[in-house]
Amino acid sequence: MQEVDMQCDDIGIGIIGGGKAGRNFALAIRSCAGAEVRMFCTRSEESARSAAESCGVARWTTDYPAMLRDPDIQAVIVATPDEFHCEHTVLAARAKRHVLCEKPMCRSPEEADLMIRKARENGVILMVGFTERYSHPCMDAKRRIDAGEIGTPRMMLARRCHPLSVLRGRKWVNDDETGGVLNYAGPHNIDLVCWLMGGPPERVYAEMGQLILKDQNFTDCAVMTFRFPNGSIATLYETFAYPGTYPHGVDRNIEILGDRGVLHVDFMSQPLKVFTDAGYQVADSVTWPMGERGIQGTLLAEVEHFIGCVRQGKTPLTTGEDGKLAMRIALAAREAAKTGKAIPIHEA
């Protein structure tokens, strides 16, 4: 894997995608030493200009191949809709630009294989944006598990719950384009559970449906059960159907029961709560709090890890193989819900 020889100069980042994810990445990189967002790229001039101006980025374009040819760009963040992740990653890899691809990695195992292969052939890093792995609470939980503090993990419950208001104005979030909640947000917890439990499950069972939403084609509730090779089990609870007035944008928590102890990670218990005439809000002080220069917290830790891997030519913590595994498990869960049968997860 190629190493970028830039001990003093900032690594130039290009971001494709001008939505919330792309802008948040740009704001996080503003707080990141040794890197600079040098260009935004989107399909329309208006959105490209708007994203660049709102994030203090000097240049923007609608021509992705031109951005990839730019000598000031050494790495790319892919923050476009899911259907374009494979195309945009492959083009970047062929241009020998390192890639941080937002989750879900892509839409099929075949796309994942292509992305992984092209990154490997061109000697570039392919990192998948599983943000939760970079949060201090989750990293500390992993450290304690690996140290044997709670013994062998035997059971886990992982919840990830969004209010309906998060979907407001996002008609592109639907089963046809993004899959249901399991494909759209579920990869975070699927990856996290596999990481904390030390590997993939041997089989998965699931139930899911559109149980709350009325006017949008989107599977809003899903429950999965995993069984691991050592007999341990896990349940994942995913929904986009909490009330729109819910005070937190994503309420998530994890319980890990070991044979010698238990760990709790509760992201709803944030230290910053906001009370105004508009109502009550639990501010996320862990994932992406705004600092003096830009976004800090977990998202900053994620981009700092990516930049460090680019500089040193190291394999990232969340690889293309991890992205492919999370997608394969999500697809197996959809099949389980459709057939009413537990689906084995084979090695691939």
Image (cartoon, helix red, strand yellow):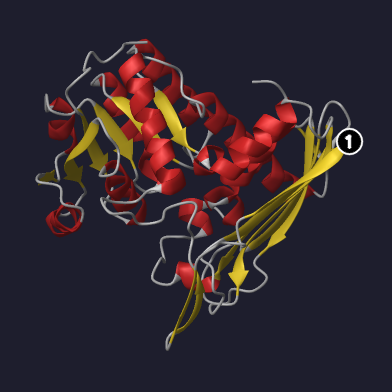
Whether residue 27 sits left or right of residue 48 in the image: it is right
- Of all residues, the one furthest to the bottom in this rendering is 277
Q: Which residue is mark 1?
A: 260
Q: Is residue 8 above or below residue 165?
A: above
Q: Is residue 201 above or below residue 125?
A: below
On the question of residue 304 being in view, the answer is yes
On the question of residue 198 being in view, the answer is no
Q: Which x, y percent locates residue 275?
A: 47, 81
Q: Please, what secondary structure does the residue beneath circle 1 have? A: loop
- Tell me the quarter of the picture where residue 268 sits: bottom right
Whether residue 232 sits left or right of residue 73 in the image: it is right
Whether residue 128 sits left or right of residue 17 in the image: it is right
Q: Is residue 46 above or below residue 192?
A: below
User: Which residue is pictured at 86% across the width and 26% down the height?
Assistant: 230
Question: Residue 270 versus residue 27: which sits nearer the camera?
Answer: 270
- Tell me the quarter of the picture where residue 232 sits: top right
Question: Residue 56 versus residue 163: which sits nearer the camera?
Answer: 56
Image quadrant where one finds the N terminus: top left
Q: Which x, y percent locates residue 273?
A: 51, 71
Number of numbered markers: 1
User: Which residue is pictured at 38% across the width and 19% down the height?
Assistant: 119
Q: Is residue 2 above or below residue 160?
A: above
User: Which residue is pictured at 53% across the width and 32% down the height?
Assistant: 323
- Tell me the quarter of the picture where residue 101 sits: top left
Q: Which x, y percent locates residue 231?
A: 89, 31
Q: Which x, y percent locates residue 179?
A: 54, 52
User: Which residue is pictured at 45% across the width and 21% down the height?
Assistant: 116
Amino acid at dot 1: Arg
Question: Residue 327 versus residue 148: which sits nearer the camera?
Answer: 148
Image quadrant where one finds the C terminus: top right
Crowding around mark 1 (Cα neighbors within 10 Å: few <14, some 14 to 19, many 20+) is few
